[in-house]
Image (spheres, rainbow, N blue to C red):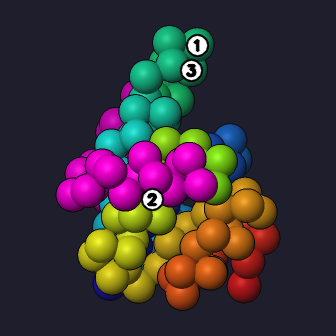
Amino acid sequence: MIVVSDATPIISFLKINRLDILNKLFGEVLLPEAVYEELTSNSAFQEEAERIKACEFFKKVSVSNSKTVDMLMRVTGLDLGESEAIVYSDENKSDLLIVDEVRTRHVATSMKLRITGQLAS
């Protein structure tokens, strides 16, 4: 199963100390580079970043077409991480995209991507 995630759902599980739920549900969770950087590069959240880095079930992946990411950002107003998550999911025919933001969910569903998150069933 190919499961891709945006940063916000990961942050939510991190805040309640339950990253293990993602591992139990999906095994491996793919994080596009921009999502991984968002989760690990802020020096104000170094402890949280180390917890993310320590999770072996998170795998950093690269989007093949950065022009598509740039276009999606310009057209939709989504940020880099959200755009990479959607493009990666589409490019690789993911089984599931984990997202929470309403605009991101609308874009993903309009592209016929299967989504879930804290707000989705």
Which residue: 41% across, 85% down?
A: 95
| Residue 54 within the segment the image draws in magenta | yes
* Amino acid marked by disc 3: Phe
Relative horizontal placement of residue 77, taking residue 32 as reference (left or right): right
Q: Label 3: which residue?
A: 45
Query: Alpha carbon of mark 2 to alpha carbon of mark 1: how far?
Result: 24 Å
Which residue: 21% across, 58% down?
A: 64
Q: Label 2: which residue?
A: 85
Q: Secondary structure at mark 3?
A: helix
Which residue: 24% across, 51% down?
A: 62
Residue in the foreground of this view, choosing between 116 and 54 = 116
Q: Secondary structure at mark 1?
A: helix
- Res. 30 image quadrant: bottom left
Segment colored magenta: 50-75
Q: Which one is earlier in the sequence, the residue at label 2 or at label 1?
A: 1
Q: Secondary structure at mark 2?
A: helix
| Residue 10 within the segment the image draws in magenta | no
Picture coordinates of residue 47, whole percent (x, y): 50, 22
* Amino acid marked by disc 1: Ala
In the rendered structure, are the residues bearing label 2 and label 1 in contact, judged by CB atoms less than 8 Å apart? Answer: no
Q: Label 1: which residue?
A: 44
- Res. 94 image quadrant: bottom left
In the rendered structure, are the residues bearing label 1 and label 3 in contact, judged by CB atoms less than 8 Å apart? Answer: yes
